Amino acid sequence: MENILKRLKRGEIIVADGALGTLLMQRGLKLGEPPESVNITNPKDIEEIAMLYLEAGAEIITTNSLGASSMKLQHYSLDDRAEQINLLAVEAARRAADNRAYIAGSVGTTGKLLKPYGPAKPEEVYDSFYNQIAALLAGGIDIVCIETMTDLAEAELAVKAARSLDTGIPIMSTVTFEEKPRGFFTLMGSSIQESAERLEKAGSDIIGSNCGNGSEKMVRIAKEFINHTQLPVAIQSNAGLPVRSTEGMSYPETPDFLAANAAAMLDLGVQIVGGCCGTGPAHIRAIRIAVDDYLQLKSSK
């Protein structure tokens, strides 16, 4: 497939996939079990979910490796299988995509705070990211997707590790924000402007936000990113915030509601739209329709 950065440079809009963990829980993943363990125990589930997103119109398929750094897997005594878990994640995604979509190697937080706020040394975190991304690259990913980051220092280490392994691989870095009285900030207190500036300086090719917010708030986040960067912006919203009931946990945003806000993001200039927690193939299909309608309207003007 053509390098994604060339398409984005031409101004194209690309639809990404939706949640993995949400769908794995629907298929029996128990609370407290790492989603990445499914790569070993039932890779067919990962492949089938990827195929559902492809059929819905996604052009980016994300690997089931968000928490597959050795540091994060230590919590489940799976750190010695980190390389295998990452390779299996890519293999499942590639089997499903069959060269019809980009494979984005998902890299999430290690789950440990960096010094001086926590016990993690920067060099340890860097090495953990380096080894994970090396395995993802060996599997044949098209994009390094550094996502759901709440500490820019940790995100920068992941970008640095990816760049040291492959100077040409496209890197997409997305951050999670919370709304405060003064605006949107990461858990560590970084604004959208600071996030945009630091992620770009670190070497990211695509920046934006995923998780943590429903699509209405993500429209506002998207607007700020567009105002503070010339890089392509990616937004992957939750289907709202989770609601707990006696029947379990659910997400309130319908596919049509999320797609309407995705269309608003396109008007702002967002080039990659997809979903995060609570979204499924129906949400991505609705986004695909919204994107196609937007492009058709644009071409008719």
Image (spheres, rainbow, N blue to C red):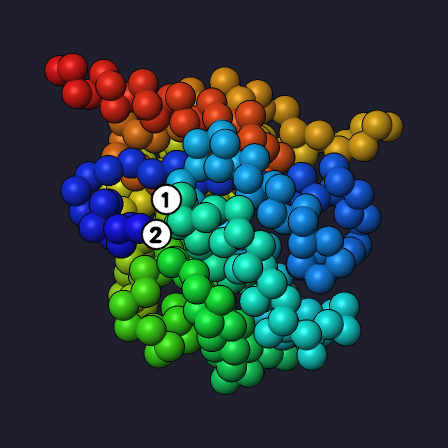
> Label 2 is placed on what type of residue?
Ile
Q: Is disc 1 in contact with disc 2, using a CB cutoff of under 8 Å?
A: yes
Mark number, residue 234: 1
> Label 1 is placed on what type of residue?
Ala
- Helix or strand or loop: what does disc 2 sit on? strand
Residue 74 point in image, percent of width and height: 71, 74
Among the 4 quarters of the image, the one containing residue 82:
bottom right
Say above or below: 146 vs 282.
below
Among the 4 quarters of the image, the one containing residue 19:
top right
Name the residue tied to disc 2: 207
Mark number, residue 275: none
Q: CA distance from mark 1 to mark 2?
A: 6 Å
Residue 6 point in image, percent of width and height: 20, 50
- Helix or strand or loop: what does disc 1 sit on? strand
Among the 4 quarters of the image, the one containing residue 204:
bottom left
Residue 222 point in image, percent of width and height: 35, 38
Of the pair 150 and 56, the residue shown nearer to us: 56
Q: Can residue 228 be seen?
A: no
Residue 137 point in image, percent of width and height: 44, 69
